[in-house]
Image: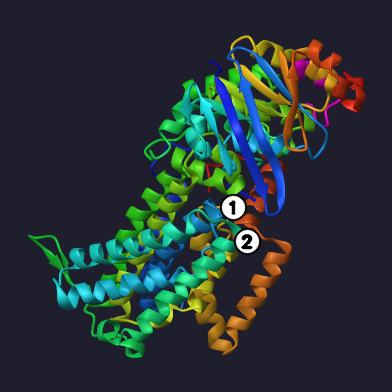
């Protein structure tokens, strides 16, 4: 189970443009379909988190099951930087990225020479350590109460400043972050670096024996993924106007895995995006009918894993191949770039 | 001076001693063979020589440089490559991509993110030439997992060659191959030995004796005999054993 092998040198592709159009216009139509502005903010923040997480799970095959901790660390770092150092949006977001990245870098020192179940267990262990430290270190994190009253800092360009106190404003900040990140990650996954990450997923031993320092690659991608989680955490702190330990829990670390797998993160760059959108739409739409919506979502996960482990993206790819075959093109002629 | 030497190698797993005082020496420009019965410790020996396992005692030198216990990627960087008895390929990649990713110039740009590999026509051409050399011309765009067993064996060697080794370790390359594929492989290794030093573990004694310049016999984790194929045919232990009969 892997991505298509054709690589592209393009920085911007059709699917990227489509996603930019859809997300860029979302505030204009989201209420017309019965949803609300804040949902868009949540979706984009978790899309950012999920895209970074999929570098690990989907591309490198590293099952990190404690990743929510780094989202939380980013949120706390954003809040503490705002309260204690400098209440500037760019500085606080940079603090979220750097602090989460540093925690990731240190954690990766212990994880990057492991694989499979040992990697997974160690990631859970570190996630739990960070969770319990955050819950007990009340002087810094305010424990179970969380860091309250984190402000949505204005977008300051020096000569001009935009307020993001309303959800639409915050949404467009998240959208701008998404737009940059999706292009950067697309390039990264279509570069030699991305090809090597995927090779590590397929056969770590062989990668070492053709001369690559596998541990260094795993360390670097784990650190990068944690830094992106920190970025999402900084945005999440503003969205919630607080930083709380619940996102650092094992449950939330499991939910990001759920989102990425249901979407099809193992076979498509876009899998995490699909998974996050499905999760939040299911939460709001199914949640309107039943409090047990997560049970139905979980059942969908079970069915997908049993019958279509490639997720929604895999179903979409199958349909595309069938359509291509009907039009008289050989399945192999369905040329798609990685993802 | 030998290109590659192992002195006093010792390796144990728990209570079991697998290698005991192994001394081996491989001259440049030769094809050296390692033979021995199943469980003799041949593959463990390869694994120690190529950095997969660290020896408990002993030294390994390449061109006089001590490389004992170095990580595999550091040993590869010094010009040592290997193929595996149990095939280690990137099954989801095409045959061409399996080779491209192993090329030194691609490895040197492993952390670059501003370009794709498919646009690197020089690397693609070099990889295609390697595939042609191992008999996989026309199969460049086929995923490794869709190749036949014999083709996968050939690709295994192609990937090892792509690292541009001056010393190539080949672990049981004929395992599972038919007569025709074995003959093609013998032809390939015969060509390669003209410009690459090769060390080969092999169970097919006719194959090994036909190609090797010098052979070491490992049994019970020790080197019990060494010599040219002709010398080994006269060796009492080899003659008594089934191994000698096959040669």
- A273 sits to left or right of B247: left
Query: Picture quarter containing residue B221?
Result: top right
Give the x, y percent position of residue B162.
56, 25
- A97 sits to left or right of B154: left
Q: Can residue A36 be seen in this view?
A: yes
Which chain is mark 1 on? A
**Label 1 crowd bin: few (<14), some (14–19), many (20+), radius 10 Å:** many
Give the x, y percent position of residue A303.
70, 70
**Label 2 crowd bin: few (<14), some (14–19), many (20+), radius 10 Å:** many
- A54 sits to left or right of B160: left
Residue under the point 63% across and 34% down: B94
Residue, disc 2: A311
Mark 1 or mark 2, earlier in chain: 1
SS for tag 1?
loop
* Colour setting: rainbow
Are the residues at dot 1 and dot 2 in contact (C-beta closer than 8 Å)? yes
Give the x, y percent position of residue B136.
69, 22
Query: Does the magenta segment cover residue B179?
Result: yes
- Tell me which segment is drawn in magenta: B173-186
- Depth check: give the residue in front, A209 or A318: A209
Q: In the rendered view, would you say A151 is above or below A88?
A: below
Give the x, y percent position of residue A316.
62, 55
SS for tag 2?
helix
Which chain is mark 2 on? A
Instruction: For the C terminus of chain B, give its image quadrant.
Output: top right
* Numbered mark located on residue A267 in the image: 1
**Is disc 2 on the same chain as disc 1?**
yes
Query: Picture quarter containing residue A77?
Result: bottom left
């Amino acid at each position: 189970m892997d991505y298509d092998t054709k690589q592209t040198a393009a920085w911007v592709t059709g699917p990227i443009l489509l996603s930019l159009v859809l997300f860029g216009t979302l505030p204009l139509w989201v209420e017309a379909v019965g949803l609300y502005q804040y949902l868009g903010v949540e979706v984009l923040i978790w899309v950012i988190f999920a895209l970074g997480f999929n570098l690990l799970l989907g591309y490198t095959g590293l099952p990190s099951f404690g990743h929510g901790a780094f989202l939380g660390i980013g949120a706390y770092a954003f809040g503490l930087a705002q309260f204690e150092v400098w209440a500037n949006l760019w500085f606080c977001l940079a603090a979220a990225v750097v602090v989460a990245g540093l925690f990731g870098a240190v954690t990766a020192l212990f994880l990057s020479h492991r694989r499979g179940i040992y990697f997974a267990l160690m990631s859970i262990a570190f996630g739990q350590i960070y969770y319990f430290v955050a819950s007990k270190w009340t002087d810094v994190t305010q424990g179970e109460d969380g860091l309250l009253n984190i402000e949505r800092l204005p977008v300051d360009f020096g000569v001009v400043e935009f307020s993001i106190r309303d959800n639409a404003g915050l949404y467009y900040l998240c959208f701008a972050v998404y737009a940059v990140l999706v292009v950067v990650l697309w390039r990264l996954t279509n570069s030699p670096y991305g090809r090597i990450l995927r090779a590590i997923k397929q056969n770590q031993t062989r990668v070492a024996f053709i001369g690559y320092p596998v541990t260094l690659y795993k360390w670097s991608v784990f650190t990068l993924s944690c830094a992106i989680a920190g970025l999402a955490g900084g945005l999440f702190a503003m969205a919630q106007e607080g930083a709380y330990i619940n996102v650092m829990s094992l449950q939330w670390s499991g939910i990001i895995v759920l989102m990425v797998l249901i979407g099809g993160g193992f076979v498509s760059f876009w899998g995490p995006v699909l998974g996050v959108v499905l999760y939040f739409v299911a939460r709001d739409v199914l949640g309107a009918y039943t409090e047990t919506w997560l049970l139905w979502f979980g059942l969908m996960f079970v069915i997908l894993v049993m019958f279509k482990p490639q997720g929604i993206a895999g179903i979409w790819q199958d349909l595309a191949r069938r359509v291509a075959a009907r039009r008289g093109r050989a399945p192999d002629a369905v040329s798609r770039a990685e993802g | 001076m030998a290109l590659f030497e192992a002195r006093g190698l010792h390796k144990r797993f728990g209570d079991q001693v697998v290698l005991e005082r192994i001394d081996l020496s491989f001259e440049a420009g030769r094809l050296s063979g390692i033979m021995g019965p199943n469980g003799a410790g041949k593959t463990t020996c390869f694994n120690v020589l190529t950095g997969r396992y660290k020896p408990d005692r002993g030294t390994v030198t390449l061109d006089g440089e001590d490389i004992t216990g170095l990580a595999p990627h550091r040993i590869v960087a010094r010009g040592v490559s290997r193929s595996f008895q149990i095939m280690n390929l990137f099954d989801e990649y095409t045959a061409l991509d399996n080779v491209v990713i192993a090329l030194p110039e691609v490895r040197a740009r492993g952390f670059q993110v501003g370009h794709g590999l498919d646009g690197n026509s020089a690397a693609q051409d070099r990889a295609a030439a390697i595939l042609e050399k191992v008999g996989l011309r026309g199969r460049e765009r086929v995923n490794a997992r869709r190749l036949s067993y014999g083709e996968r064996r050939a690709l295994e060697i192609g990937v090892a060659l792509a690292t541009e080794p001056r010393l190539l370790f080949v672990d049981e390359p004929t395992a599972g191959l038919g007569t025709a594929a074995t003959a093609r492989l013998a032809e390939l290794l015969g060509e390669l030995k003209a410009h690459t030093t090769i060390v080969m573990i092999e169970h097919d004694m006719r194959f090994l004796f036909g190609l090797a310049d010098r052979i070491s016999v490992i049994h019970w984790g020790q080197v019990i005999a060494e010599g040219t194929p002709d010398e080994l045919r006269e060796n009492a232990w080899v003659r008594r054993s089934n191994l000698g009969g096959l040669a």
